[in-house]
Image: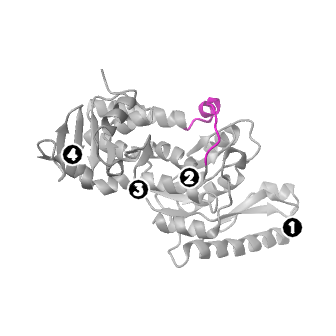
């Protein structure tokens, strides 16, 4: 009989080492996220005082890729690093579940692909099924929905799903300002940098919330001529809106990116993150801008959205994922316990930490 997650928590907790210096690896993260119902053993990576303590309890052997390991009672194998990476690097991408660090599913996917054993191929298929289910708007709409604590909590819920997708050459792009705290855990789980995608909707003069196009940094305006014609807009009115939004876009790019290089997405998977999508218009515009910047694939990840809006975004992007898709849906803010405004200082601090 295999080990359940409860068994793992009990066993690891009984090792008597600092939990901040231990991260679960191998197949155990799949158990922690509910991809598997049981595992046969426990692989963990330890550093510092934890490794010193654990390595003194058995015969230390050299691993294939420069790390060391020791076999312990209870089906535990403790490693000084993981597949050639130091423990610090694995911990940096990890998430906490029930007080224990668990390796990113992106690391698990890479590990399983490298080994390619029959068990690993089965696990990769299970990860794909789990990720598909977790990003299905119909399935997620049926779940019980509890209010998210804050934007960081939304990102922590999204991170394992996006990591399980193992996107090629990921670039995590956040829509400032509310999307920035959501995006930080996602970038950490994927082990990639965090950047902003500055997008401005081009709204009708009579109804600015109704967009006839969008503009992003370094590109020409993306205009829906059908809406322009239906609204009977003059060329001068379109030009005035574009000029005003271009000025604001330039100001925001200078604020958030400073003297950094212009955003380039050629050949990359753009993961566009926001705290929510009530109508999806901003996220939809962001997809168009990301493609115009050369993205090979675009994934939209939002904290919360109505099921029909998430499905719509999935038709425009290559995939759309939400931490929750509740109904009835009145506003993004109703699904966060803390939905305080994110100011520019917080945005800049998170961007610095993420890079």
Q: Is residue 279 magenta?
A: no
What are the residue bounds of the magenta stretch? 135-149
- Where does label 3 land, which residue? 191
- Where does label 2 land, which residue? 152
- Where does label 4 land, which residue? 54
Spatial separation of the CA atoms under disc 3 and disc 2: 17 Å
Classify mark 4: helix, strand or loop. Answer: helix
Pick the residue in front: 287 or 189. Answer: 189
Spatial separation of the CA atoms under disc 1 and disc 3: 47 Å
Quarter of the image where the C terminus is located? bottom left
Disc nearer the start of the sequence (2/4): 4
Mark 1 vs mark 4, foreground winner is: 4
Spatial separation of the CA atoms under disc 1 and disc 4: 73 Å
Scheme by which the image is coloured: one colour
Quarter of the image where the N terminus is located? top left
- Where does label 1 land, which residue? 234
Q: Badge 2: few (under 14), some or many (20 or more) residues near its Cα, within 10 Å?
A: many
Pick the residue in front: 140 or 155. Answer: 155
Q: Is residue 217 visible?
A: no
Q: Position of residue 280 (x, y in %)?
A: 70, 49
């Amino acid at each position: 009989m295999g080990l359940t997650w409860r068994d793992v928590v009990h066993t690891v907790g009984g090792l008597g080492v600092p939990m901040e210096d231990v991260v679960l690896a191998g197949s155990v993260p799949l158990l922690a996220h509910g991809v598997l119902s049981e595992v046969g053993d426990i692989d963990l990576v330890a550093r510092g005082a934890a490794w010193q303590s654990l390595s003194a309890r058995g015969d230390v052997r050299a691993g294939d890729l420069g790390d060391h390991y020791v076999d312990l009672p209870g089906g535990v194998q403790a490693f000084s690093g993981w597949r050639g990476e130091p423990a610090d690097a694995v911990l940096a991408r990890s998430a906490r579940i029930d007080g224990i660090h668990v390796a990113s599913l992106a690391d698990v996917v890479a590990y399983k692909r490298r080994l390619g054993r029959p068990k690993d191929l089965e696990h990769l298929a299970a990860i794909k099924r789990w990720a598909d289910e977790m990003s299905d708007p119909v399935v997620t709409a049926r779940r019980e929905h509890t209010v998210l604590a804050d934007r960081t909590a939304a990102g922590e819920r999204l991170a394992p799903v996006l990591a399980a997708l193992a996107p090629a050459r990921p670039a995590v792009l956040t829509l400032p300002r509310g999307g920035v705290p959501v995006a930080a855990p996602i970038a950490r789980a994927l082990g990639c940098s965090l950047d902003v995608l500055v997008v401005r909707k081009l709204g009708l003069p009579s109804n600015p919330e109704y967009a006839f196009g969008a503009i992003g940094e370094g590109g020409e305006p993306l205009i829906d001529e059908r809406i322009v014609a239906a609204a009977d807009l003059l060329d001068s009115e379109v030009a005035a809106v574009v000029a005003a939004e271009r000025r604001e876009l330039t100001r925001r790019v200078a604020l958030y990116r400073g003297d950094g290089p212009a955003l380039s997405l050629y050949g990359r998977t753009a993961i566009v993150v926001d705290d929510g999508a009530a109508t999806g218009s901003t996220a939809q515009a962001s997809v168009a801008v990301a493609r115009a910047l050369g993205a090979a694939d675009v994934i939209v990840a939002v904290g919360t959205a109505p099921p029909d809006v998430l499905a719509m975004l999935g038709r425009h992007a290559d995939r759309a994922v939400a931490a929750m898709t509740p109904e009835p849906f009145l506003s993004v803010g109703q699904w966060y316990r803390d939905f305080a405004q994110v100011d520019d200082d917080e945005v800049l601090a998170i961007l610095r930490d993420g890079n």
